[in-house]
Image (spheres, helix red, strand yellow):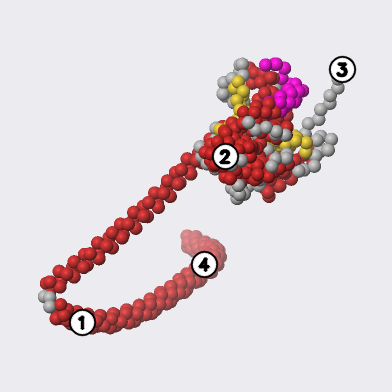
């Protein structure tokens, strides 16, 4: 009984335990299922979101690909259309060229036919002419051909001789042109060298140390010398030498004498420079007067006014192509005298006009015009006779010669000059250009003095310090530059330097 109950109880307990275990297991399974369902739903939601993103990206990519494909298709269609248009144009051009070639070919064919017809007609005419010639001249074909060839040969020889003469004439003309060009270049080179030689003076120095003293502290001595004389003082590497450059030979001589005395004296400063320049100017005036008197005495020309003698003395410092103008005037006076004796002309008029014919060169830097006209006006102002004045003005053709004496003076001048007429220009023109520079500068108010130096590449203007201040000096330089540019023609450029200097001088007694 007990065992049966125990078995029953055991079975019941086992059944109960199994039921409880099953219930617990089922409950756990239900819980796991819910969790799995939740995870699955989350994964599905995530998958759906990713699917949407993928679909959107795919749609965007597909849209881009579609747009790119459409763009390429449009470009391809455009290129295709352009190619079609080009091909159409080429076909049209080819058609037009083909039509033109066909027309040209038809025209050529027609012309060929016409040419053939003309050839046939010419051949027929030639044969008829040959037959007619044979009939008229009773000559055979060979004989006529021989005569025809001889006639043609004679004609060709005449044409060849004419051509040879033409070629020789052209060669002579070309040779003359080249020769004139060579001569002109030679004259130009010689003239350039002569201008350089005629505008430079050299002052020897006892030592190289003297150059520094001439320059002075900060260049004050050399500036004072240039300002007082109006020449350019060049101090370079040439040993024991100072070069004076200027277009006016009288100024250059004054500067040479003053500088020579300064070198001997040794006291070189601005006040001493001005003092010796003034003395040198007086001495040069005396030299001009003495040289004029000596030349008039040597030329046997008497009764000249003192001003005319001084004007002739200025020619002592002038040269023309290495020929001293005063010596040239004396030579002309002698030649004129001899020629007048031989021709029975007025000897005194011829000699006097020959001696004075270049007097205008002494002041040609100061007066505008040809030196012959200037000289005639000077002679007229100083009381010379009408025939002498006319001979002076006519000796270079500025006036038509009307007297025998005028012709004699012109001929004598040509005999004396190694290059007839070559010295009418060059140095004179160069000097006039420099004089024009100075005249422009002197025309402005407040200008005391002006000097053209360095062959006209520079002009130095000294102004009155009580009338022109520093600002006005700068404005004056600009105004002078403008005036030069408007009124003068010149090579290169011209430097305009305005100098304003104030001095205070007192004397201790």
Q: Is residue 309 above or below residue 205?
A: below
| Residue closer to the observer: 254 or 237 | 254
Labelled pair 4, 1 in contact (Cβ < 8 Å): no
Residue matched to label 4 = 57
Q: Which numbered disc, 3 or 4, marks the residue that appears first in the sequence?
A: 4
Mark 3 or 2, nearer chain start:
2
Q: Quadrant of residue 431?
A: top right
The magenta segment is: 264-288
- Mark 2, Cα crowd under 10 Å, few <14 / some 14-19 / many 20+, is many
Could you tell me residue 274's position as x and y percent?
Answer: 75, 25
Question: SS class of the residue under badge 3?
Answer: loop
Instruction: Give residue 83's mark.
Output: none
Tag 1 residue: 125
Quote the CA–CA distance across marks 3 and 1. 125 Å
Quick one: quadrant of the C terminus? top right
Query: Are the residues flagged by discs 2 and 4 in contact, CB closer than 8 Å?
Result: no
Give percent across and percent down for residue 488.
Answer: 66, 47
The mark closer to the camera, 2 or 1, is: 2
Residue denoted by label 3: 508
Q: Earlier in the sequence, mark 2 or mark 1?
A: 1
Q: Position of residue 266 (x, y in %)?
A: 70, 16
Q: Nearer the viewer, residue 403 or 122?
A: 403
* Neighbourhood count class around disc 4 (C-alpha, 10 Å): few under 14, some 14–19, many 20 upward: few
Badge 2 is on which residue?
Answer: 340
**Is tag 3's residue or tag 1's residue first in the polypeptide sequence?**
1
Distance (Cα) linking label 3 and label 2: 66 Å
Q: Nearer the viewer, mark 2 or mark 4?
A: 2
Tell me the residue at 36%/55% (across/down): 169
Q: Which one is closest to the eye, mark 3 or mark 1?
A: 1
């Amino acid at each position: 009984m007990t065992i049966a109950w125990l078995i029953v109880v055991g079975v019941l307990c086992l059944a109960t335990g199994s039921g409880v275990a099953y219930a617990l297991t089922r409950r756990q399974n239900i819980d796991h299922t819910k969790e799995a369902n939740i995870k699955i739903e989350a994964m599905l939601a995530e998958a759906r979101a990713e699917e949407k993103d993928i679909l959107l990206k795919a749609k965007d990519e597909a849209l881009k690909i579609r747009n790119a494909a459409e763009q390429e298709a449009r470009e391809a269609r455009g290129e295709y259309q352009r190619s079609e248009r080009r091909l159409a144009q080429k076909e049209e051009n080819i058609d037009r060229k083909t039509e033109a070639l066909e027309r040209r070919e038809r025209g050529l064919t027609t012309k060929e036919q016409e040419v053939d017809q003309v050839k046939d007609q010419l051949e027929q005419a030639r044969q008829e002419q040959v037959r007619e010639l044979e009939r008229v001249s009773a000559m055979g074909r060979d004989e006529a051909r021989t005569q025809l060839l001889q006639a043609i040969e004679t004609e060709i020889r005449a044409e060849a001789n004419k051509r040879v003469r033409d070629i020789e004439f052209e060669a002579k003309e070309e040779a003359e042109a080249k020769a004139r060009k060579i001569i002109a270049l030679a004259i130009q080179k010689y003239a350039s060298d002569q201008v350089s030689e005629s505008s430079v003076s050299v002052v020897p120095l006892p030592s190289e140390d003297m150059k520094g003293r001439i320059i002075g502290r900060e260049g004050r001595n050399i500036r004072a010398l240039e300002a007082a004389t109006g020449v350019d003082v060049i101090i370079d590497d040439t040993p024991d030498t100072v070069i004076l450059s200027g277009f006016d030979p009288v100024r250059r001589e004054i500067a040479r004498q003053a500088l020579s005395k300064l070198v001997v004296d040794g006291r070189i400063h601005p006040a001493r420079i001005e003092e010796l320049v003034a003395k040198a100017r007086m001495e040069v005036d005396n030299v001009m007067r003495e040289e004029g008197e000596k030349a008039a005495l040597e030329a046997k020309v008497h009764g000249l006014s003192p001003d005319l003698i001084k004007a002739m003395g200025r020619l002592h410092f002038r040269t023309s192509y290495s020929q001293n103008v005063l010596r040239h005037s004396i030579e002309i006076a002698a030649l004129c005298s001899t020629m007048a004796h031989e021709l029975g002309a007025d000897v005194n008029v011829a000699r006097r006009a020959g001696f004075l014919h270049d007097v205008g060169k002494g002041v040609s830097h100061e007066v505008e015009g040809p030196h012959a006209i200037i000289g005639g006006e000077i002679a007229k102002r100083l009381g010379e006779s009408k025939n002498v004045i006319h001979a002076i003005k006519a000796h270079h053709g500025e006036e038509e010669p009307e007297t025998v004496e005028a012709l004699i003076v012109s001929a004598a001048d040509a005999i004396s000059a190694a290059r007839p007429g070559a010295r009418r220009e060059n140095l004179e023109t160069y000097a006039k250009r420099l004089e024009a520079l100075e005249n422009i500068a002197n025309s402005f108010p407040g200008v005391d003095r002006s000097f053209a130096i360095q062959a006209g590449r520079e002009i130095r203007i000294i102004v009155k310090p009580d009338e022109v201040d520093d600002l006005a000096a700068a404005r004056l330089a600009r105004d002078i530059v403008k005036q030069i540019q408007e009124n003068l023609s010149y090579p290169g450029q011209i430097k305009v330097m305005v100098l304003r200097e104030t001095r205070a001088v007192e004397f201790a007694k």
